[in-house]
Image (tube, grey):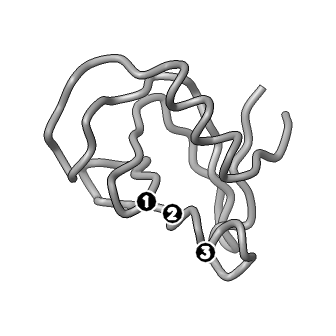
């Protein structure tokens, strides 16, 4: 698996948007599988989206998200976002 930059995550999202939604200030869900690594654990998401604030929401029930600007600046709790 490859560690993705925030620009690569945004590109994957744009190329793979699916179902329309208005949840969490996103316009579409993306069903492209990604892995989120933080300091304590690893999470797998098959349904995610990016809102207008630049947050990648990867668990809608728990409102878990990664601020992509902070991620790119290495200021995020997120150590890595990975995909094939």
Instruction: Kindly identify which residue carries mark 1.
Output: 55
- Residues at circles 3 and 2 in contact by the CB criterion of under 8 Å: yes
Query: CA gap, disc 3 to disc 1?
Result: 10 Å
Q: Quadrant of residue 69?
A: bottom right
Query: CA gap, disc 3 to disc 2?
Result: 8 Å
Q: Give the side of residue 13 with respect to residue 50, left or right.
A: right
Q: Quadrant of residue 38?
A: bottom right
Q: Is residue 46 above or below residue 48?
A: above
SS state under label 1: strand
Question: Residue placed farthest to the left in the image?
Answer: 22
In primary-sequence order, the first of circles 1 and 2 is 1
Q: Give the side of residue 13 with respect to residue 40, left or right.
A: left
Residue under the image location 63 percent in, 51 percent down: 36
In the image, residue 44 lies at what x, y percent? Answer: 57, 40
Q: Nearer the viewer, mark 1 or mark 2?
A: 1
- Residues at circles 3 and 1 in contact by the CB criterion of under 8 Å: no
**Which mark is drawn over residue 1?**
none
- Residues at circles 1 and 2 in contact by the CB criterion of under 8 Å: yes
Q: Quadrant of residue 54?
A: bottom left
Of residue 19 and residue 1, the one placed in the foreground of this image is: 19
Residue under the image location 29 percent in, 59 percent down: 63
Question: Looking at the rendering, in which quadrant would you find the C terminus?
Answer: top right
Q: Is residue 83 above or below residue 40?
A: above
Q: Nearer the viewer, mark 3 or mark 2?
A: 3
In the image, residue 23 lies at what x, y percent? Answer: 16, 44
SS state under label 3: helix
Instruction: Kindly identify which residue carries mark 3.
Output: 70
Residue under the image location 41 percent in, 22 percent down: 17
* Residue count near mark 1 (Cα–Cα under 10 Å), binned few <14, some 14–19, many ≥20: many
Residue under the image location 51 percent in, 31 percent down: 13
Instruction: Kindly identify which residue carries mark 2.
Output: 66
In primary-sequence order, the first of circles 3 and 1 is 1
């Amino acid at each position: 698996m490859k560690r993705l930059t925030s620009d690569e995550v945004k590109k994957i999202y744009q190329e793979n948007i699916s179902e329309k939604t208005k949840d969490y200030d996103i316009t579409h869900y993306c069903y492209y599988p990604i892995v989120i690594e933080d300091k304590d654990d690893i999470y797998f998401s098959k349904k995610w989206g990016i809102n207008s604030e630049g947050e990648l929401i990867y668990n809608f029930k728990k409102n878990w998200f990664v601020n992509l600007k902070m991620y790119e600046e290495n200021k995020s709790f997120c150590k890595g976002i990975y995909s094939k």
